[in-house]
Amino acid sequence: MLDLAILGLLKEQPLHGYELNKRLGETLGVLGGVSFGSLYPALRRLEDDGAIETADGAGPPLGPVPMPATGSVSGEVTVGRIRRRARTGRRTRKAYKITERGEARLRELLVGEVPGANDERVFALKFAFCRHLPREARLDLLQRRRVDLGQRLVEAREAEPARADRYTRSLAEHRAKSIEHDLQWVDELITAERRQLPHATQEGATA
């Protein structure tokens, strides 16, 4: 999942490791708990695999580090040295960009299965980047999601307790209604995708 998130973000633009971590939390809340201890080993592995490469100087600016005034000559000299070191460090800060191999890997991750991962998080992550897929592949992703939701709805209804108290019954009904709402949303997405398909492909999808 982390590889998918990194490659998806780098598909949009080169990013520094710090900015990547920030966007994983802000833009992709499903991976908001990623630490630098997990991110940087993943970046090194993807770089070793040829999926990403460094692009020094690329990516959005990180902005200057504020330096407080000291009120003394010696203090201002010290602040000047710190600023010079910060500027030097910013020039050498690594930014990453996706390669052709990485784009191929991103497509594989978007259309493939992710064993052992949480279904909700996986779908949310794939859906966030599905614009990078051909329309037919996006439709297939949504159709597989619909099948999964349909099965979960059947299981939720079968599991509704017949003799439970009203609170337990209410919770079970809420779960079923949530799945029904997701199904309606996915159906609307599928309809919108099919409208964009060539006429011959639409006939095949409805056959």
Image (cartoon, helix red, strand yellow):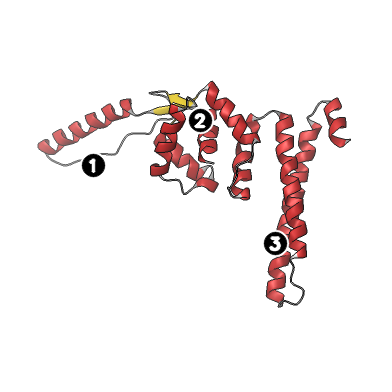
How many other residues sit within 10 Å of disc 1, few (<14), some (14-19) or many (≥20)?
few
Q: Which residue is mark 2?
A: 10
Residue 68: assigned label: 1
Tell me the amino acid under the disc marked 3.
Answer: Arg
SS class, disc 1: loop
Q: Amino acid at mark 2?
A: Leu
The image shows residue 22 at horizontal and vertical percentages of: 45, 41
Horizontal side of residue 96 vs 203, given as left or right: left
Can residue 185 be seen in the rendering of this structure? no
Q: Is residue 118 left or right of residue 62?
A: right
The structure residue drawn at horizontal position 70% and vertical position 34%, both measured from the top left corner, is 138
Which image quadrant is residue 84 in?
top left
Decide which of tag 1 and tag 3 comes sooner along the chain.
1
Dots 2, 1 in contact, CB < 8 A: no
Left or right, 206 with reference to 74: right
- Work out whether mark 2 precedes mark 1 in sequence or the reverse, and give the earlier one: 2
Say which label, 2 or 3, has the lower sequence index. Answer: 2
Tell me where residue 145 sits by quadrant.
top right
- Secondary structure of residue under mark 3: helix
What is the quadrant of the N terminus in the image? top right
Query: Which residue is painted at 73% across and 51% down in the image?
Result: 149
Q: Amino acid at mark 1?
A: Pro
Label 2, residues with CA under 10 Å away: few <14, some 14-19, many ≥20: many
